[in-house]
Image (cartoon, helix red, strand yellow):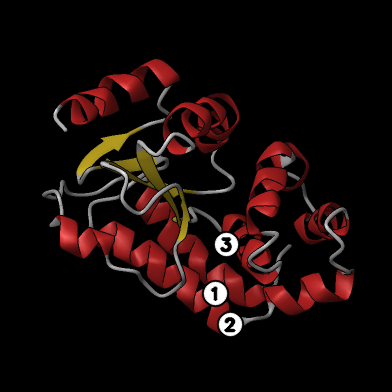
Amino acid sequence: MIRRSLLRFGVTAILIASGGPAFAAPATTELMKEGALPEKSFGSADAPVTVIEYASLTCPHCRSFHLNTWPTVKEQYIDTGKVRFIMREFPLDVRASGGFMLARCSGEDKWYAVVDLLYRTQDKWARVQEATIALKSIMGMTGMSGEEVEACLKDQTLLEKINAVRDAGQAFGVESTPTFFINGELTKGALTVEQFRAIVDPFLKAE
């Protein structure tokens, strides 16, 4: 298991996953403020539509969006300047916290590759008995040593920052993953390409 200090997060994760009271949509200016960690964004800052995704690396629905919808969204909306897409951490369990920590520890140039790898190998680390051993093996493919994995997972300051991003999302009304804010409007669930188009295209036509 990932180190003991991370286990304190488990109770909070269960509460989040079980749902809670409804929240009003946050003010766009508050939602767009950078939090405890630098934003991980794709696309032009001047794009007419901004999409913010709160995701958990152990969430099967997040994995589905990443593998099945994200490639088309990136090609047709982000790379063409129509959408700016921001990914934010919302770990629902201790292992997702550890995965996000490893992505951040990997550095700016490897962050996305690690997130992609962890989604693609989700079944090999998120639901096995010895998660740390599995993560060491997987992260070895990125060049990170076992000692570096252990050191990263012991970084309490980084864990607290990831938790702060999660807590801010919860304050905005995020209760489950994936949750999207599309030009400030909250949408829950792993959107298909068709569903994404149905929400985003009217914003583009209004420009």
Type of amino acid under label 1: Leu
Question: Going by the image, does 137 lie left or right of 7?
Answer: right
Task: Please give the residue where the numbered disc 2 appears in the rendered image.
Answer: 156
Task: Please give the residue where the numbered disc 3 appears in the rendered image.
Answer: 97
In the image, residue 181 sits, relative to residue 157, either above or below, namely above
- In terms of secondary structure, where does tag 1 sit? helix
Question: Going by the image, does 188 lie left or right of 63?
Answer: left
- Image spot of residue 164 (x, y percent): 39, 72
Type of amino acid under label 2: Gln
Does residue 126 appear anywhere in the picture?
A: no
Task: Please give the residue where the numbered disc 1 appears in the rendered image.
Answer: 159
Residue at position x 43%, y 53% in the image: 14
Asked whether the beta carbons under mark 1 and mark 2 sit within 8 Å of each other, the answer is: yes
Task: Please tell me which of labels 2 and 3 falls first in the chain.
Answer: 3
Asked whether the beta carbons under mark 3 and mark 1 sit within 8 Å of each other, the answer is: yes
Residue at position x 70%, y 50% in the image: 113
In whole angstroms, how far apart are the C-alphas of marks 3 and 1? Answer: 7 Å
Type of amino acid under label 3: Ser
Dot 1 surroundings within 10 Å: few (below 14), some, or many (20 or more)? Answer: some
- In terms of secondary structure, where does tag 3 sit? helix
Q: As rendered, which of 64 and 106 lies closer to the eye?
A: 106
Dot 2 surroundings within 10 Å: few (below 14), some, or many (20 or more)? Answer: few
In whole angstroms, how far apart are the C-alphas of marks 2 and 3? Answer: 11 Å
In the image, residue 155 sits, relative to residue 34, either above or below, namely below
- Image spot of residue 96 (x, y percent): 58, 55
Quadrant in which the C terminus is drawn: top left
Does residue 113 appear anywhere in the picture?
A: yes
Quadrant in which the N terminus is drawn: bottom right
In whole angstroms, how far apart are the C-alphas of marks 1 and 2? Answer: 5 Å
